[in-house]
Image: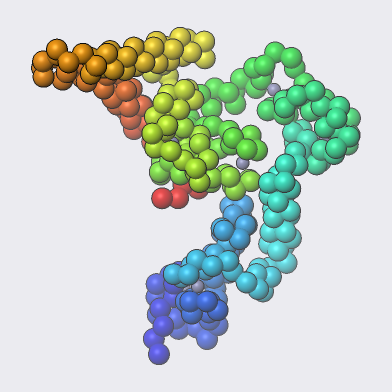
Amino acid sequence: MNELCNICFEIIITPSIWRCDTCSAVSCLRCMRQYVRHKVNGGQVTQAQLVCPGVCRQPLTNLEALMAPTLWLKYTRFLTTQLEIQRGTRYCPRPSCGAALQESDEVKTKGKRRVYCHTCQIESCFNCGEPFHSWPLCKDRQFRRYCDRNEVQTCNKCKWPIEKHGGCNHMTCLRCAYEFCWLCQQDWNTHSKVQCLPLAVFHSKNIAFGPTPPVRFVTKSVVATVAAGSAIVVGTAAAGLALTGASVIACVAVFALPPIAVKQQLKKAKLKKMRPLDATAAA
Ligand SMILES: [Zn+2]
Ligand SMILES: [Zn+2]
Ligand SMILES: [Zn+2]
Ligand SMILES: [Zn+2]
Ligand SMILES: [Zn+2]
Ligand SMILES: [Zn+2]
């Protein structure tokens, strides 16, 4: 019985086989252990991520048997952290501390960015991990410059920085497993294609809109006003029955052109920035 491994796609020659209870997919035990190790090291530890490599995509069972003791420890730590983040727990942003913030800390915490930690007894900026600063831009210029020049955004849920290297726009945060659209930042489960482009323009830090946030704000406002104005023109035009066919086409063109131009601009800039993958992008 020549069975094919679901991971390396070779005929299994070893007697050590892993078999799925649900879909009877098989793989070499070695491949399976490697697959699990790769998932855990990439922080993919939830039930939706550690799944059978066969057709059923069901959560893997008996995980401890597939991991070395050190990997198991790593897995349990990742899982605890992810579950706590999903429950709303926040962690001290200082790299040397990282303790879970307690309820008493949250009472002392003055805002989302200003956090007090009982363990190190320091008020830090949640975004950069440095001591709290009232000026909203973090000082870590090198990191900020890197984020500006590369495709880096923060996860909407846990605020962890995520870098995208190519792939599609369906992103999964490796830290808290939140799934979202890279362009418009909507939750992937309730993602609306109609709102995607307008929201993408709103959230975009694309240099095509200007080099700094205030300039981009002005450019985007102009784009939004022109688009809204054109929509009114079309509305009025449609109401006026005296219009000839030719002028209707002209009005539709005025309405359609600004969003199309923006989309092309985004596409151009995106192509320029394409690089290989870091965070998970699933089709
Ligand atoms: Zn194999
Ligand atoms: Zn299966
Ligand atoms: Zn701390
Ligand atoms: Zn900061
Ligand atoms: Zn996240
Ligand atoms: Zn979207």
Foreground pick, 236 / 31: 236
The residue sitting at 32% across, 23% down in the picture is: 259
User: Does residue 10 appear in this view?
Assistant: yes
Q: Residue at (68%, 49%) from the top-left corner?
A: 82
Question: Does residue 204 appear anywhere in the picture?
Answer: no
Q: Position of residue 11 (x, y in %)?
A: 40, 80
Left or right for 216, reference 45:
left
Residue at far bottom of view? 1
In the image, 173: left or right of 242?
right
Residues 237 and 281: in front is 237
Pick the front one: 107 or 95: 107
Q: Quadrant of residue 126?
A: top right
Q: Position of residue 156 (x, y in %)?
A: 59, 35
- Quarter of the picture for ligand 6? top left
Asked whether 242 or 234 is in front, the reply is: 242
Residue 259 vs residue 189: left or right?
left
Q: Point out the image quarter for the N terminus.
A: bottom left
Q: Where, by quadrant of the figure, is residue 40 drawn?
A: bottom right
The colour style of the image is: rainbow
Residue 222, image x and y in percent? 39, 10
Above or below, 256 against 104 in this view is above
How many marks on residues?
Answer: 0
Q: Is residue 149 above or below residue 243?
A: below
Residue at image coords 62%, 57%: 46
Classify 145 as above or below 21: above
Image point 46% across, 14% down: which residue?
A: 216
What x and y, as percent, mark residue 159?
A: 63, 34
